Image: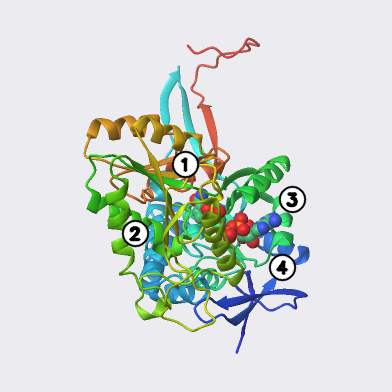
Amino acid sequence: MTTRITHWIDGKPFGGTTERSGDVFDPATGEVTGKVDFADVATVDQAVASAATAAEAWGRASLTVRSRVLFRFRELLDARKEEVAAAITAEHGKVLSDAVGEVTRGLEVVEFACGIPHLLKGGFSENVSTRVDVYSIRQALGVVAIISPFNFPAMVPLWFMPVAIAAGNAVVLKPSEKDPSASLLIAQLWAEAGLPEGVLNVVHGDKVAVDRLLEHPDVAAISFVGSTPIARYVYETGTRAGKRVQALGGAKNHMVVLPDADLDLAADAAVNAGFGSAGERCMAISALVAVEPVADELVSKISERMASLRTGDGRRGCDMGPLVTRQHRDKVASYVAAGVEAGADLVVDGRDQEFDGASDGFWLGPTLFDKVTPSMSIYTDEIFGPVLSVVRVDSYDEALELVNANPYGNGTAIFTNDGGAARRYQNEVQVGMIGVNVPIPVPMAYYSFGGWKSSLFGDSHAHGTEGVHFFTRGKVVTSRWLDPSHGGLNLGFPQNT
Ligand code: NAD
């Protein structure tokens, strides 16, 4: 039986008819489990109109009222995170524990946004000129849109929506059409928390919905996360239409292992960060740069660990789930073939494994290549699957040069016991998020998340203070309250006395 997955407009499911829809699969069985409505221009307009109306009152609601809704939402999401996680596993395929982890990281942004009264505090300077005070305030933008990718159907919307809402905006979310259900559960929890109707709307769909959001005159800002070509397109189109845009793109994250590193720690980290969520993470490690002479030992430790991994249905306690769609599975498998063809050493072949799941699931096991060179497509392209490539280099300088030559700059990690080398790396590497003996250095909610180069278009990262700034505009007020001595006429430029 397939379920119809509808939009969420004005605080409730939107029951209107739809001309277009998309199939939603359970990747562990290969079955179609849902049909998701695809929004046309009129439906997007309806969601934006609902948000625009709601934004007026919500932007005027007191900080106390807004933060209370945030606190209630935090409690509800925490209480029901397993339910949200189950919806993620059913449509994305990632294992349940990983899905719970994703919701928990999103919850941390909600907790950060609960502090909005403090975060929106402005500055105040008394008596900058005689009897003149200056203060700064930050105000909401109005309607903002969030466009999110398939790989974190809860966490990525939650990077933005709590901060945007807490700051007094109304939101239109366009989640990935591949796994849309988690966003609806989250919308329902906001409604239960007392968020007024229209402050959060969800429209499903594809390019038609995205393009309408990008050109809609009532949408003030766009937060996008997805692949680099679409991020660049969203940034260019949105800014041309006069909007504030932050567009986070793809990644090719390198883990550099220096000869003095703890190789057991590095091998554990490479396996966890390479194959967690089947490599479908923008912070996954896909290139392991082994600084000789450690490569042989490291590859052997990694392949030993890979032998114990169980790939299968995410509801069965496996380590790794299926890929999101058959098409994506086949694309990733084609990279494995291309790596062999290009002459890399295929140490572990994920195509040739046993899977703990239905035969029609979108399976591909963890795959390890050694002796990969920078010209091979398994190195140059973002594969977004469970394929880890080991590149051997002779020195720290060669490793750094390789990482900095890469067009992406999302995350990177260095494994070493030399504090000086680690410090040099964090200073010299052209990447936005860096781990020292930490393979997936996702910043806490009160810092900001974002990469450099082709991994981010725009100048604001997600959440933390940059998120608060992105969803607000500053004003500076210069005020003088009259006292009995009036200054009289003076047409000169204001001078401070
Ligand atoms: P995607 O670019 O295919 O889709 C992202 C969103 O854009 C979806 O909502 C989709 O419906 C929409 N979209 C797709 N094609 C479009 C088009 N032609 N015009 C307008 N909108 C379009 O990305 P995905 O496959 O869902 O997600 C995986 C990608 O996201 C990877 O590249 C990954 O690295 C990246 N990602 C980046 C980060 C980050 O923080 N930098 C985080 C998560 C995922």
Return the disc, 2 or 4, that comes first in the chain's sequence. 4
Mark 3 or mark 2, which is nearer to you? 2
Q: Position of residue 438 (x, y in %)?
A: 30, 48
Q: Is residue 1 above or below residue 111?
A: below
The kind of secondary structure element at disc 4 is loop
Residue picked out by circle 4: 39
Q: CA distance from mark 1 to mark 2?
A: 29 Å
Return the mark for residue 466: 1
* Amino acid type for the residue under numbered disc 1: Glu
Q: Split into 4 quadrants, where in the image is the N terminus?
A: bottom right
* Amino acid type for the residue under numbered disc 2: Asn
In front here: 7 or 10?
Answer: 7
Picture mark count: 4
Q: CA distance from mark 4 to mark 1?
A: 31 Å
Return the disc, 3 or 2, that comes first in the chain's sequence. 3
The kind of secondary structure element at disc 2 is helix
Q: CA distance from mark 1 to mark 3?
A: 24 Å
Q: Is residue 144 left or right of residue 97?
A: right
Q: Position of residue 494 (x, y in %)?
A: 58, 14
* Amino acid type for the residue under numbered disc 4: Ala
Q: Residues within 10 Å of mark 3 (few under 14, many from 20)?
A: some
Q: Position of residue 219 (x, y in %)?
A: 67, 51
Q: Residues within 10 Å of mark 1 (few under 14, many from 20)?
A: some
Residue picked out by circle 3: 215
Q: Is residue 207 left or right of residue 128?
A: right
Return the disc, 1 or 3, that comes first in the chain's sequence. 3
